[in-house]
Amino acid sequence: MRLTRVLDFRPDQGWNFVDLAPTLLINRSDLDATGLVQPGSRVSYRMLFAGPRKAVEGFKAGLETSLPENVTLRDIEDTNPQIRSAMDRSGRFLNLASLVSVLLAAIAVAMAARRYSHRHRDRVALFKCLGAPQSVILRSSLLQLLLLALAGSIIGIAVGYAAQAGLAWLLRDLISDHLPRPGWSPVLLGIITSVSILAGFALPDLLRMGKTPPLRVLRHDIGPPPLRYGISGLAAIAAVAGLLWWMVRDASLVTGILLGAAVTFAALGAAGALLVRLLQGFRGAAGVAWRYGLASIARRGRESIVQVVAFGLGLMVLLLLTLVRNDLMASWRASLPEDAPNQFLINIQPWEVDAMREFLRERGIDAPPFTPLVRARLTEINGQDVSQITFEDPEGENWARRDANLSFRETPQADNRLVAGTWWDADTTRPEVSVEQDFGREMGLELGDELVFDIAGEAVAATVTSFRTVEWDSFRPNFFMVFSPVTLEGFPATYITSLYVPADQQRVVIELMRDFPSVTAIDLDAVLGQVRDVMDKAALAVQAVFVFTLLAGLAVLWAAVQATRDEREYESAMLRTLGASRRRVLAGVASEFLAIGLLAGTLATTGASVAGYFLATRLFELPFQFNLPLALIGPLVGMLFVGLSGLIAARRVTGAPPVRVLRTA
C-alpha cells in the first residue's frame, strides 16, 4: 500500500488511549489482503450516525433498549470529557438563564398588572353604574391583556428569530456549519410562556379590579376588597412551577430555583417591612429632600415593600448571573489554558526517563512529571473469582474482563480529590489502592475490599483504602486505580507523560522521536482544537443569553418604578401647587429611590453570593470564591440602577402641568 494522505482529524475521535493512538485508514476492499482479520485477532466495529437532533435522539432512544450487552452506544458528549463538561455546564447555564428570565418576566407582569388594576378602578365603577355586569367587565379586560400578550409573544418570537439570524451572520467566521432552521416549538413555547405568566400573575389583580364597587364613582377612597394572597400566591406558584418544569424537565433545578426565590422573596419582604417600620415618624436631621424621600417610603408602606422585593429580586438575578457567568468562563479558561498539553508520550522505558528530562531541558521545554504504567488483569474481589461475579453495571463487567493500566504514586495528583477514606503515607509498606469514585460504583467496590491482580503471572493483592474524583478533562494522565508505590514498584513498567510544545518548536517532537525510537508521540492539537471550538461556541451562547436576561432584569426595574407613577404624579402636582420647586420634588423622589436601591442592592448582593455558592458547588461543580468587588459594588449598583430609574421616571412625572393632573385626579 502507498501512503497518499495524512489524517488530521476523525469525527469520532475521543479522549482515551485507544482513540488517541495513531490511526491508519484503508479502503474496506483492501482489508482481506492485509491478513489482519483472522482467528485470534482482536477486532471491534464502529458505526457512525448523523442527522437532525430530534431524529438522532429518537434513534438513540430506540437503540438503547435493544442493543446486546457487548455493544456500546456513545454520543459526542460521551466521547470527549472536555466537550461533555463544556456542553453540560453551558446547558445548565442556559437553563438557569431561561428560568430566571421567566421569573423576571413574571415579576414585571405582576407589577404591571397591579398598576393596570389601580388605574382602571374608576372605569370599572363607572361601567357598573351604567349597568355592565362584572363578568362582561372582566372578559373585556382579560381580552385586552390576552391581545397584548399575543402581540408581545409575536414581537418576542420575531426578535428571537432575528437575533439568531443576526448572531449567525456576525459569527459566520467562527461557526462554519449552517445552523439548523428553527422549528415551531420555540413559537409554541413563547406563546404558552406569555399566557401562563399572564394567568398566574395578572389574573388575580384583574379579578380584584372587577369587584370594585359602583360607589367609588362618588368616593375615591373606596376600593375593591383585599386580595386573597393565599389563593393568588398558589396560582402564581403553580403557573411558574408548571412552566419551568415543562421548559427544562429538571426537577432538582426547578425546585432549587423556586425555593431560592421563595426564601429571597421572604427575606426582601421582611427587610422592606422593617425599613418602613423604622422610618415611620422619621424626623431626622437630614435635608428636606431626604426627609421627604424617607417619609414617602414609610407613608406608602405596602407599595414600598413591594418595590423593595421587586428591585431586590431583579438586582439579585442580574448579579447572580454575572457571578455564575464569570465563574463559568474562568473555569473554561483554567481547564484549557493556552499552554495545555498538546503532546502525549507513551512507551517510555524506565532508563529513558532521566535522559528525556535532560533532552527537554536543553531545548527550553519544562520537563513534565512522568507517570509509571503497569499492565495487569483483575482476577479476584474479596476472594471471589471475577469470572463468577455478575456486575450490575455493564461498564464494570467490561473492565473486569480485560487488561487494565495501573499506576502508583506517593501523593495524590493535583487534579484528584479524595472523597472517602485516607491516602497512604509516603513510607507505607502496606499494599493499598485508591479507586476513582464512579468506577468504584460501577464495580460495586467499598472501602476495605481486597483486590487481587495478575501482573506478569504473579498474583498481587491490595486493599481499597480511598475513593477519589478525577478531572478527566485535564489532558493529563489519570487512572481508575492508583496504588501505593510498594505494591507495584518491583514489576515491569513503562512511563507516560503529557507536555506542551509551542508551535514554533514542533521540530523538537521529531528530534525526540529520532533520539528515543521506542517512544510514541500522540499529537493532541486536533482534539484541543475541537474542544476549544466547542467552548468558544458555548461561551458565545452564554453571553448572548446573558444579554437577553439582563434586558429582562431592566424591564423588572422599570416596571417597579412605574408601579407608583400615578400616585407620584398627584403628589408632585400638590407639592408644586403649594410652592415646591420641580428641582426639590425631583430631589425628594431621587432620595426615596436611592434609599430603596441601597437596601435592595445590599440584600441582592448577599442573596447572590449565597445562591452563587450553591449553584457553583452543587449545579456547575465549580470551586466557589467569594467575590469581594461584587460585595462592595453591589449596593452601589443598586443605588445607581434604582436611583437613575426613579429619577428618569420622576422627570416625566414632574413635567406634567399641575392643573391638568389635579383636574384628572
Image (cartoon, rainbow, N blue to C red):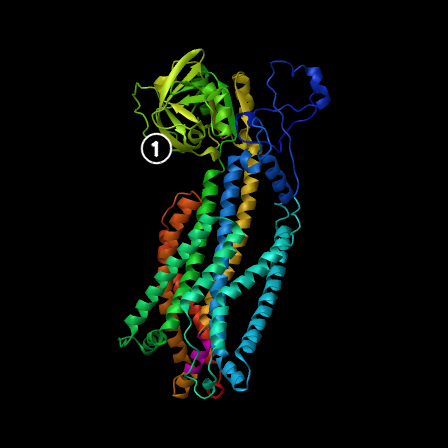
Residue 456 position within the rendered picture, expressed as x and y whole percent measured from the top left:
45, 12
Number of marks in picture: 1
Residue in the picture at 45% in, 88% down = 218
Query: Which structural element holds mark 1?
Result: strand
627, above or below 32, in the image: below
Residue sitting farthest toward the right: 29
Residue sitting farthest toward the top: 457
Q: Amino acid at mark 1?
A: Ala
Q: Main secondary structure of the magenta part?
A: helix
From where the camera sits, is residue 641 visible? no
Is residue 619 or residue 518 the one in the foreground?
A: 619
Q: Residues within 10 Å of mark 1 (few under 14, many from 20)?
A: some
Residue 488 occupies quadrant: top left
Residue in the picture at 63% in, 55% down = 166
Residue named by callout 1: 420
595, above or below 426, in the image: below
Residue in the picture at 55% in, 38% down = 77
In the image, which residues are magenta?
A: 564-571
Report if residue 568 lies within the magenta region.
Answer: yes
Residue 524 position within the rendered picture, expressed as x and y whole percent measured from the top left:
55, 30
Is residue 179 or residue 462 the one in the foreground?
A: 462
Is residue 650 or residue 125 the one in the foreground?
A: 125
Residue in the picture at 45% in, 40% down = 334
Report if residue 108 lies within the magenta region.
Answer: no
Q: In the drawing, does residue 2 fall left or right of residue 341?
A: right
Residue 28 position within the rendered picture, expressed as x and y whole percent measured from the top left:
71, 23
Residue 89 position within the rendered picture, expressed as x and y whole percent measured from the top left:
49, 44
646, above or below 37, in the image: below
